[in-house]
Image: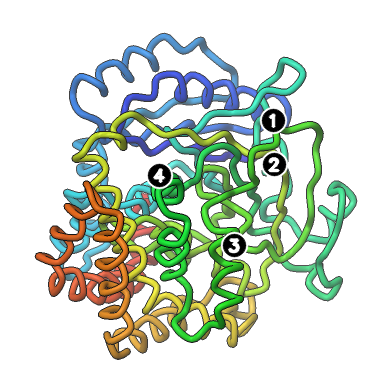
Amino acid sequence: MNRICLCLPTNRACSATITALHAEAGHAARRFGADVRLLILDSADDRTRAAHTRTVAALPPEPGVSVHHLDEEAQRDFLRRAIRTAGLPEPDRLLRLMLPPAVSYGACTNRAFLLAAALGCHSVHRRDSDSTYQVHAGQPVFPVHHELPWLGRPAAEASAAVTRTDLDPALGHRPVSLAGASFIGELSVDLGEMRRLDEGVYHDVVGLWAPAGVSPEQRRELVEESFTGAGTAGFTGDHSTLALVDPMRVDMCNIALHHDVYERLPLPPATDTIGSDYFLTHLVHDAMLPGILHNRHIENFYTPERRTDAGFLAYQTRFVKFLLSMLYLHHVYDRMAAEGDGLLDDRQRVRPDRIVEFLRESTRLDRAENEWRLDRVDTAYRKLGGRYATVADRLAARRAELLDQAERDIEDFAHLIEAWPSLIEAART
């Protein structure tokens, strides 16, 4: 039986999402005969977590579905035991990278990867607490419908089940390593207000995540498609493509990865940095591993916390840290693209050593590009005024720290990759 991990990391109230996810788990068990481990990694406050506990307790029994609801203390206990079993140096550093005191999109998903290994799962299917399923003909539109049963099987076997194939037949023997779609609704990054206030400033700021040397036209094209997902049109019928999946076409609230990917390489554990959980989508594409791109998009919405002054400041800081991370990640992505299937060993599995090499190369880059990014952000935010100017003041006070942290995040990622095989093996025990 195919055992899968349907995962929901959360730090906010999301009882409705938990209930909906349980329904998707039941669909996977009934339709595909999967053994579903529904994993809720709960970093919410005590009151919210207690509400989640009541929600989980009220879920009806579902054959083939087991629910695992872990608070941070339970997660920390699991991690300590895994790190101790692995016998790795600097255990406190590893624990901090896996469960940092600040928000980390990569670290919460890395914990899901380790727990999936401990649970004996063959794949991880991630959803988010600030999203919901579309409804078509009175039924929820579950992404797992396309994620199973092809993950891990040769791509050639999946070709008859998809609507379209854009994959070179020479890659047909390689395993389907990813299945995913995007979202509809609000922008995935909370910049809609900025766009309404000043379209020019929005284009200047969003364009900063492009490589420094791109043409103005390439930068404009990137801005136009950034953070928009699949637009706003609702689901009307299934369409799926077997291909090397473009990372710009999938979202981490709507993705499934085969264990041969995430058990070889974790995600960057950077804190307070949006986009830190997308690294593996680039890796799967550049290593020429097949995937399935489908159209069962999830509906994205914003939680009220983002609208508060504190939430606004935190989110804008995470966005700026994302911009700074791109100095290093663009270098790594370029190296991965040039390497192609040289990123794979003779068993068609990712080679972590090559990624570590590229990451360490990137930390020797000149920081001038990031200095320029911060200058541009400062100018743009002060032009908008109001609370954007307040953000600019906070960023200016932390300028040196932010520059240092962006580089240190890459060093931490390389360190975690080197420890990862031992952590995965320890988790299995």
Residue under numbered circle 4: 193
Q: Residue 247 carries which label?
A: 3
Earlier sequence position, callout 2 versus callout 1: 1
Q: Mark 1 points at which residue?
A: 33
Q: In this view, does 205 lie above or below 133?
A: below
Q: What element carries label 4?
A: helix
Who's the residue at 32% across and 64% down the image?
Answer: 380
In three-dimensional space, the C-alpha distance between marks 2 and 1, rounded to whole angstroms, equals 10 Å
Give the residue type at disc 4.
Answer: Glu
Q: How far apart are marks 3 and 1 (CA)?
A: 29 Å
- Secondary structure beneath dot 2 equals loop
In-front residue for pair 204/254: 204
**Depth-wise, is mark 4 or mark 1 nearer the camera?**
4
Tell me the quarter of the picture where residue 424 sits: bottom left
The residue shown at (25%, 56%) is: 317
Q: Residue 148 carries which label?
A: 2
Crowding near pointer 1: few (<14 within 10 Å), some, many (20+)?
Answer: some
